[in-house]
Amino acid sequence: MTILSIDTSNYTLGVALLEEDQVLGEYITNLKKNHSIRIMPAIQTLMKDCGKTPADLTKIVVAKGPGSYTGVRIGVTIAKTLAWTLNIPLVGISSLEILAAGPGRYFSGYISPIFDARRGQVYTGLYHYKDGSLVAVEQDQLVMLADWVEKLTSSKEPILFVGNDLPIHRAKIEEVLKAKAMFATVTEQNPRPAELALLGRDTPGEDIHTFVPNYIRLAEAEAKWLEAKGKTLNG
Amino acid sequence: MKKDQWILGIETSCDETAVAIIKNGREIAANVVASQIESHKRFGGVVPEIASRHHVEQITIVMEEALDQAGITMAEVDAISVTEGPGLVGALLIGVNAAKALAFAHNKPLVPVHHIAGHIYANRLVTELQFPLLALVVSGGHTELVYMKEHGSFEVIGETRDDAAGEAYDKVARTLNMPYPGGPHIDRLAHEGSPTIDLPRAWLEEGSYDFSFSGLKSAVINTVHNAEQRGETIAPENLAASFQASVIDVLVTKTLNAVAEYGVKQVLVAGGVAANKGLRNALEAAFTGRDVELVIPPLKLCTDNAAMIAAAGSVMFEKGIRADLALNANPGLDIEIYN
Ligand SMILES: [Zn+2]
């Protein structure tokens, strides 16, 4: 069993190879650079260093969003193509869940992974570990950070916030949630591709042809068109 | 006996997800196109984000169908060619990354192709090219005269300074309240009317092979506007015919001038607007009795497809053009880069 995981959904670019119970290799950068140029060479280098060829792969696990639309699509396109042409299973994992997985593992409260979505909005969800597995308590969503922390004031458990975009929102979180809010350290803010591989390890494969990113949002033109037609998103 | 050459082509520069397989540079073994036109109609034009989303949904389906149609496996493919640009960056990225993943998975050469080179090479699926030649490229985004002295060499001798011919068609169609895409509607309507309205032709300076259609487009809009103010109505079929006559007059005359100056053996017509009946008829009439072969591909090879990318890819592959896994989408790619 050799799993290749790919994450290009946000600024963090990640690739990992997970074999049985060992992480063979992991490549992570947190740079505002072009994923389309760097991701395939990163996969190629990591696999070569680990002595693996594409034919050795048994599963592809990809971060399916939310995140940058273009970024998510780059990873998903590569993952779909590899899984389809190598005839191996494809699994998609929430980009937020990957972020929650590492730092939250030995934390008994809730975990709120955060990606900034501009204009006061964030992509987030609420996760916690139950009997050793990560469970979503609140689904991934696009929400105003102010509304999100207000909602979390009713939580009895402490909440661990994770993500490279925390500096943008930390003051507001602390102001509302006070001591109930905890923050991951700088070394735990990147979503780890090895966690991505592990999250997908025991998950059955999905239909490759119909697999799509989880954008959360409709394309802007589509949303405006629906609005103009007087329809609402929830029917 | 020489082994057959199989090239897989991928094209996602705009709103068609296309994959094709070409044998020995000229034979179509598979040509699959998933069109998104219905999805974009309601927006009156291609929405880049929606185009990109569709490409992700379609890409592996279209690749699989192409291999099935050709009846070959990836092991038999000699190279993977892909549109590097120009086009919509988000749309191009899907094809480029799928091509890179495919090339990596099977350790195959990756050949980057310019979209317009693809349109030109659609003609090689019809007949063998004879050099030197001239290609008249007319599409939604391009109006160019390209001189080729040999395979894989492209010299742009004239190009549009403002709107592409196809853009002018779409804008005029909008003025006449026609649905998107407007080109075919104008073409059809033009055949019902006659060119009774005097519209300008932009010849530009003496000897120039460049084009300009924005003045013509404005003249059409002004004609409609002025008539409305006077409470008159203009027969839309006559306006369409007059507009089309102006566009075709400029395209045909500049092509004939270039043919005379460059002494070419062939004239290739390329791009979506090559599907235009008025243009086809005018070119055929202009080249009758001349010692120059006029080649116009069938309709489905004029609009965006991947057979043309694989056909160009075949030539580029033999010229030794290669990309590595760092290949990126290039929305402003220059066609003269590989000369
Ligand atoms: Zn085109």
Image (tube, coloured by chain):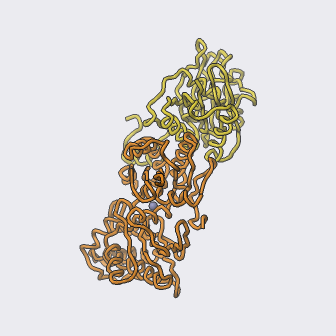
| Quadrant of the image where one finds ligand 1 | bottom left
Q: Residue furthest bottom?
A: B206
Q: Residue at x 37, y 53 (%)?
A: B37
Q: Residue at x 46, y 54 (%)?
A: B1
**Residue B28 image offset from top left, x and y in percent:** 39, 55
Does A155 sit above or below residue B201? above
Give the chain ID for the yellow colour: A
| Quadrant where the C terminus of chain A is found in the figure | top left
Give the chain ID for the orange colour: B
Residue B131 visible, this angle: yes
**Residue A141 image offset from top left, x and y in percent:** 53, 32
**Residue B257 image offset from top left, x and y in percent:** 46, 84
Residue A94 visible, this angle: no
Q: Residue at x 55, y 31 (%)?
A: A60
Does B337 sit above or below residue A41? below
Does A69 sit above or below residue B177? above
**Residue A201 image offset from top left, x and y in percent:** 56, 23
Q: Residue furthest left?
A: B192
On screen, residue B218 versus residue A8, left or right, reads: left
| Quadrant where the N terminus of chain A is found in the figure | top right
Does A78 sit above or below residue B306? above
Q: Residue furthest top?
A: A131
Q: Quadrant of residue A94?
A: top right
Q: Residue at x 59, y 22 (%)?
A: A127
Q: Residue furthest front?
A: B1
In the foreground, B337 or A174: B337
